[in-house]
Every structure is written in structure tokens, then in C-alpha cells.
Image (spheres, coloured by chain):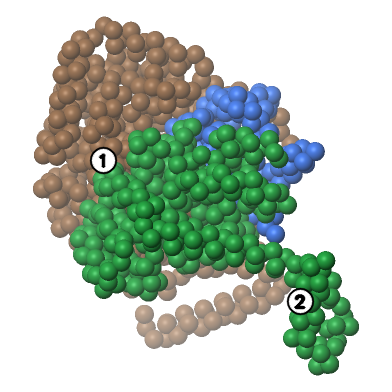
Amino acid sequence: MSESKAGEAAGNRAAYEKTVEKFLQKAPERKAAFRTGGGLPLKRLYTPEDLEGMDYERDLGYPGMYPYTRGVQPTMYRGRFWTMRQYAGFATAEESNARYRYLLSQGTTGLSVAFDLPTQIGYDSDHPMAQGEVGKVGVAIDSLADMETLFDGIPLDKVSTSMTINAPASVLLALYIAVGEKQGVPMEKLSGTIQNDILKEYIARGTYIFPPKPSMRLITDIFEFCSAHVPQWNTISISGYHIREAGSTAVQEVAFTLADGIAYVEAAVRKGQDPNVFGKRLSFFFNAHNDFLEEVAKFRAARRLWAKIMKERFGVTDKGAQMLRFHTQTAGSTLTAQQPENNIVRVAVQTLAAVLGGTQSLHTNSYDEALALPTEKSVGIALKTQQIVAYESGVTETVDPLAGSYVVESLTNEIERQAAEYIAKIDGMGGMLSAIEKGYVQQQIQDAAYATQKAIESGEQIVVGVNKFQVEEDASERALLKVDESVGAAQVKKLQAMKASRDNLKVQECLSEIRSAAKDEGTNLMPKILEAVKAYVTEGEICGVLREEFGEYRENIVL
Amino acid sequence: MSERKVRVIVAKPGLDGHDRGAKVVARALRDAGMEVIYTGLRQTPEQIVQTAIQEDADAIGISILSGAHEYYFGRIIELLKERKASDILVFGGGVIPEDDVPKLKAMGAGAIFGPGTPTSVCIDWLNSAVREKWARETA
Amino acid sequence: MEKLIARALEGDHRSIARLISLVESESPQAEIIMRKIYPHSGKAHIIGLTGSPGAGKSTLADKIIAHFKSLGKTVGVIAVDPSSPFTGGAILGDRLRMQQHAVDPDVFIRSMGTRGSLGGLSRSTQEAALILDACGKDVVLIETVGVGQSEVDIVKIADTVGLILVPGMGDDIQIMKAGIMEIADIFIVNKADRDGADRVATEVNMMLDLLGMRPWRPPVLKTIAERNEGVEEVVSEMTRHADFLRRSEEGRRRRWQRLGMEVEEILRREIAAMVEVAWEKEKSPELFELLAARKTTPYEVAERILGTILTETCD
């Protein structure tokens, strides 16, 4: 810029500020201070000044190239849209199978399995702790028999399947491999994801079983097994989604998720695994919340920060292992029970944020989920929302369209900076495991959650239909999905019949194999578990043995 | 003299791990001057009821998002009856369809707070319901 | 009230719980309750567990309960958490780690807020312990807040004080500062799988050496409470300490000292109540005017009030 031009610019800026000052006297702004949904301060106006010091090549670069700020593929959605993957599953394997077939017929391109709580916590349907919970929030899977039904008529070489399973992830992955084998699909050809992210269970989601040490071992066993035998499988989905749902800010979501990621990489490296290899199969899972600009910036910041961590901290040179690939789900916690149809609009805004943030796959919530499990109709609308953004909105036709926006780049920088600060703090505590043990992470999230609640109750934060623009509603007109209370009993009966018909001698053999493998950290548990599930050993039996060997985690409550 | 304090159990029955709501409510009740006994996750109805008895609680608040509310409310209220402790109030929240609320109230639940309820509503209800309970005790 | 006390003495948990509440809220019946309860107490082994927040007190308590249970003992637990000084509310979360015992009829767990008592251990903590003792619990375990005065105050209530230390938490310095070396009967180095556990144990032993010969040399034990390692030994040392107190001169000295404190405490409370009543009666604007104008002194006023109290009580 020539000096005269710079002088002119400074003059214009001063003139603008003066105008604003005058203008404010007549028309004050709505609030004294403006903030993002995650609490970052927002200025009235962003200009090139805010991006001073930014180096395009270094900080943004090109899509598909380090540091991947602009996306992980060179052409992004001009090549292929993100995977539209709807999380579903309820009641029995038969009913869930029918829902999957419906979703596939409607153009969904990947399955996402929701398991019921007993399955997620390693109890069979006939365990006393499972009472009242069988088939409620997902499908009940006890053994290979249920898994065969779940994927009946769905060719596993044609779909990719994501499974939200954590503590017993090895068992469910083994079951999937076993079903594939029965269909004649070798495990090399299977593609999909297991969530397998135990740290965020301790932090935010609560479906843990074992203490941290053996849990980390199960995870690194999976990394190792899949690197050798299931190369297309995403071995982990490091999840910020639930951290955000538990009430964190956007910055915390990025920070704690990547800090979890660091802990997993460190654990595998300690076991002698190569981050250039297993690093390619790490995937992430984020939340798409309401604050549109902040969310877009969040995804971009996470991508850049992870690339730097892999490259600089772990010396990773493989490009695939530097990339942060992620799944997104729209924010369940933003759904309101009041005027539920409004949620359709919220989900649309969140969808747009995820897409402009460069997501690899997306689940959109159904509008009735604050009330109950979604109906087929509401799931349909959620999926159509993605299709409308993909096919009609036009935002997919060029790569990373919001790049260069002064505010988006400023927020991207700010989120990255603050997240890196958190990570440094966690490093200082001795890493994520000890930060969790100290309750630091949980405390941070709960403080943020409580602050949000207070802001809503004071009216500082508006939720349409909840604390402003309320209307009288007639709830009786709503059609909600209810899981039949008889599901539990039916599932138990099926389980008992299966147990009576299998080779129980073989079952005992498999279980004692698992027990001795559990005692020896040098043995990979995966092959033993695979052997067991093929012999129709149940999930509860396998986890039961592991519970005896590993002990159980008890939460570290901080309030 | 230290006055009598409202004592409330906040519990997560069953396997559901979503504890944001329970924790936010626990904090809000504390900030309203109550003593909150927080039991954490994965509590059986038996544990919750015994806890309420040992703690001489005025009320039990349960949070369920897993759809298993009918079972847990029913069982907890039944156990309170068995232990002759039906004077302990039971309330709750979570993902509970409005259609189910009358059924839960018929079982004996004092109040159900759906998503989006301000914590102040819950606090007000507790304060007045517990004071009525105390009045019954001295009567 | 009679019925309630009788049922509690039979071990009914609901009645015990109610008695504790009445005492805790300093209800008018509190004194009646304590008078009735007291003769039945004095049988339990009262154990205090103290240590910094995060030392693993609740987890250790959970395992200690289980070990006493396996010896056929009944156990009462009082877990104290801080109350908010601003709202008086509290979140009492210690029992979370002991919930496996919640349904055991031989275990009674009670959470208490400090309710403004500076020491973190209120008078009602002691009264609750006496109630649990009288109502048939063989062992009463008191878990303190673990900060400030409570670490020292626990000695006034408990027969046996266990102090929990954790390597790497700077506890060693803490101990010397607070001067609580003298009050601990058992030192427990928890989370002993961490680096520095041996160093902490050695340092404690060296400090104990400096204190010189005492009739009871506190053992220094290492535990990993989470994995139930070393807890059995803690329990057996606690029992050994109880035996020591029963048989030794030191034990008799401590028992008498505590009984003395109990009497003093009641005396102080009673007198304070009388003083309050008398002062309320005496207070008047005229009196304050006289005081302000230095026509009389606080000493004279106090003397007069004391005189009234004495004549009234003698009548």
C-alpha cells in the first residue's frame, strides 16, 4: 500500500468510528457487549486489520494440503457430498433392520447404529441392571444372532457402518467382522467406524465400564489389529460432540477433543505403533451448534490445530495421518420441547455450519428428539434437510466459501489459540488422563453448562419458544414413537433360547482364553474376542470376564 | 440456631449417562440454599431409596433421558411405600413425553419438569412442597 | 419422640436418620435426644479419616467399610462436605463412592454439610457419631472435609485418626505446616503406585523419629484404594489401635480428656444461652447511651448481668 493510500484508509476508518459514535447516540446497540454462543467476544466490525500477520500459504494453504484449514480433500463437495449418515436403532434387531432398509431406500449413504444402554455398558438383556432399559435408546445386541438379524439383507461390502460403541467396542467390531464373514465379505473389505473413545465417556457421556488403563489397552489393541487386518476401518471417533452436549464452549470442545486425541496417539506410540500408520484411521466427531460463524471457524481451527499437533508433536509425515477427518451431528441440546417444529430450522442452520466447516459426514437430528425417539417422518425431514443443503443451497459448489472472511478467519485464529492454551495447561497437569482424574476437565464443562443455564434463565440468552415468543401448545396432537414395553421380555427369551442351543463347552473355552489374554498385556485381545463371538459367546459374558479382570471405573464427581 | 434445611437426593437411575441436567439442577438447588446429596450415575431404585432414608431426605429428584422413566418412577415409588417412606417427595425431569406425565403423577410423582424448564420453577416447587411436608410432620 | 428414639436404638435406619436431622438442625428436642442416647453410646470404635481433597478419602472409606463388614462388623459413616458460605447450600457427593453399601442393612451412610462451622466439623458431627454408636454401629467412620481446622478437630471426636497422604501433592509440606503429625494415629500413603510414594513414607517416618518415643508409634502404610490394595492392613492397624487405647494408660488419658471436653462444651453452651437471654433483657437504648457517654463501662454492665444470672440460677 502506498503511503497516501494508507493515510486515506486510516482517515476512512476514523471517519467511520466517528459516524458510529454519532449513530450510537441516536440508536444504541441491542447489547453492551456481543459474544458468540461459546462466549468469545465479537467486535462490531472485522476488517483486514484483524488479519494482520496472517500468511495465506502458512495459515490457510490449499484444500487437501497442510495445514488443511480449507478442507481435507482438494475438491471437497464438488467431487462427492459428505456421507449422510443418520444415527438410528431401537428396540429389537428386526425393527432396527427395517429402519435401516428404509433409510437406505431414501438415499442415506451410510448406516449409524445406536445401541441400547445395556449393550453400551456390556450387560446382556437379562442382567438385573438392564431392567427397564432394553431396546430403549437403541438396539439390543447380545450375541452374533442379533447382529445377523440387524444386518440381514444389507451387504456389508456396499455400505459403511458407524457404530456408537465405546467401552465394549472390541466386541461389537468383532461381531461386525463375524457377520461380514458369514456374508462372504472379508474383513479387509469392511469400512466403517467404531466410536471407541473412552476418555470422553469419563468426561461427558458416562457409558464407561473399565478403569482408564485397561480401557486404553483395549483401544490400542484395536488400533493394532485393524492396522493389520481391517485397513479401511476407522478405529476411533474422537468425540467432542458429547463434550459440547454436556455444556462446554466451542473452544473447550476443540481443546478437550484434541487433548483426548493426543492421549490416544501417545498410548499407541508407547506400544511401539507408528502414528503414520494408525494415524490415518483416527477420525473425529464434532457438534454443530447454533452460533453459525463460530461453528464454521471451530471446524477449521480444529483441522489446522490437529495437523500441527501430528506434524510437530508426533513427527508425522504421512499426509493422511495429519488430516483431521470428522463426522458431525447437529446439537441435540439445542432442540426444544416447546414448539418442536422450530427445531427443523435450527437443524438447517447447524447443517449449513457443518457443511461450510467441511465435514466428512453428517447426522441431522429430528425435530421431535427433545420429546422422544424420532419417528420415521421426523427422521425423513432431517435427512431431507441435508439433501436440500447439498443439492439446492449452492454452498457446495466451491471449496471453503467462507475463507478470507475477516470475522471467520479471526474466530478461527482465536479458537485455535485458546484451544492450544487449554492443551498446554492439560499437558502441564500430566496429560488428559490425569486432568480427568483431577476432575479439571469435568469442572470446566460443568461451569460452562451452569453459566449457559443461568444466561437462559436471566434472559440474556434467548431461546425462541422457550424464554421468548412462547405460545400455548397442545401436546396431545403429537405423534411420538414409543418403544413397546414388551421388547425387553422378548429379547430375554430370545437370548435364553440362543444360550440353550449353542456349544456351551466351546463358550467356556473361549471365555477362559479371553481371561488369560486379559491378564497378559502383551497379548492382543481382539483375535480372542473374535473367536468368542463366532461361537455365540454373548457380549455380557465377554465383558463380564473383563470386568472381573480389569475392575470397574467409578466416576470422579466434581460439582 | 441452625434452621432446618431442605435435603434433596439428586440421582441418575439406570444406565443413562447424560448427567448435564442432573448436575445443573444440583448446583441450582445448592445455590438456593438446599443440601443436595448427589449419588452419581447408575443407581438402582433400591440404592436411591435407601440413600433417601439414611439421608433423611425431603425429596428425591431423578433425571432420565433414556425413555425408561415409567419403570424407574414406578419402582422407586413402590419401594418408598414398602419402606413406609412415602412422605418423601419424588420429582424428576429429562426426556419425558408429556403424554406420560399424568401416568407418572398418578403413580405418585410430585412434579415432572420437562426440557427447557427454568431451574427457578423447580426450586419454587420444592420449597413449597417440602414446607407442606414439614407442616404435615408437625401436625 | 420416645418411640422414635426406641426404634433408632433398635437400629431402624429411618429413625436414626431422623434423629440425626433433629440434632443437626439444633431443634428444641436435640437435648432430649442426646440425653436419652448418651447412656447407650461408648461402645463403637470411632475413626476419623482426614487428608487433602483429592487424596482418595471416599474411595478408601468405601474399601474400609467392606473390610470391617467382612469381619462381621456393622458400620456407620458420616461424610462431611463444605457448605457454601453464601447460600448455606451444599452438594454432598462423598457417598457416591460408597454407594455399593447403600442397600446393606448393616451400613448406614450419612452426608453432612459443615453449615457454617469454621472447623469443618460441627458439634452435630460428634452428636451424629454418638447416635450411630448408641444405635448399634460397631464402627463409626467420619470422613472430614480435609481442609483447614477439620484436620485437627477430628482428634476431639475420633478414637483413631487416619491421615491420608498422596505422593506428588505437596502433602509433606502441608503436614509440617499444620502440625498434624501429632494427631494422626495411622498414616496412609494412598495412590502408592505413583512415583514418590516411598519417599513420602520415608519422610513421614523420619518426622516421627524426630517426635521421639511415644506409647503408640503411628504406622505408615501404603495403599492403592482404587484397587483395594493395602486396605486390609489399614483396617487391622485401626483395630490394633483401638485395642491399644482400651488397654493403655494413654487410652485412658484420651478418653478422660474427651469426656472432659464434652462436659466443658455443654457447660459453655448452657452458659452462653443464659448469657444471651440475660443480655437481651438488659439491652436498651438508654443503656447504650450511657455506654457511649462513658457514664458506665462494659465491665460494669457485664458484672451486673452476671450477678443477675447467678442469683436467678441460685433461686
Left or right of A307 in this view: B83: right
Task: Report x, y in % for residue A273.
Answer: 12, 46
Q: CA distance from mark 1 to mark 2?
A: 70 Å
Q: Residues within 10 Å of mark 1 (few under 14, many from 20)?
A: many
Identify which residue, A547 or C198, lies in the foreground.
C198
Specify whether residue C148 is in view: yes
Q: Residue at x 47, y 58 (%)?
A: C255
For chain A, give the colour: brown
Query: Is A292 above or below relative to A219?
Result: below
Please name the residue that numbered disc 1 is placed on: A215
Please tell me whether mark 1 sits on a helix, a strand or a loop.
Answer: helix
| Foreground: disc 1 or disc 2 | 2
Residue C14: quadrant of the picture: top right
Chain of the residue under the numbered disc 2 shown in the image: C
Look at label 2 and name its amino acid. Leu
Expressed as whole percent of the image width and height from the top left, the position of residue C188 reads 30, 56
Query: What colour denotes chain B?
Result: blue
Kind of residue at disc 1: Ser
With A391 as the anchor, is C276 left or right in this view? right
Residue at the image point whose x is 21% and y is 12% from the top: A504
Looking at the image, which residue is at 63% across and 50% down?
C34
Image quarter where the N terminus of chain A lies is bottom left
| Position above or below: C263 against A203 | below
* Residue C306 disc label: 2
Foreground: C112 or A341? C112
Q: Is residue A546 above or below residue A34?
A: above
Chain painted green: C
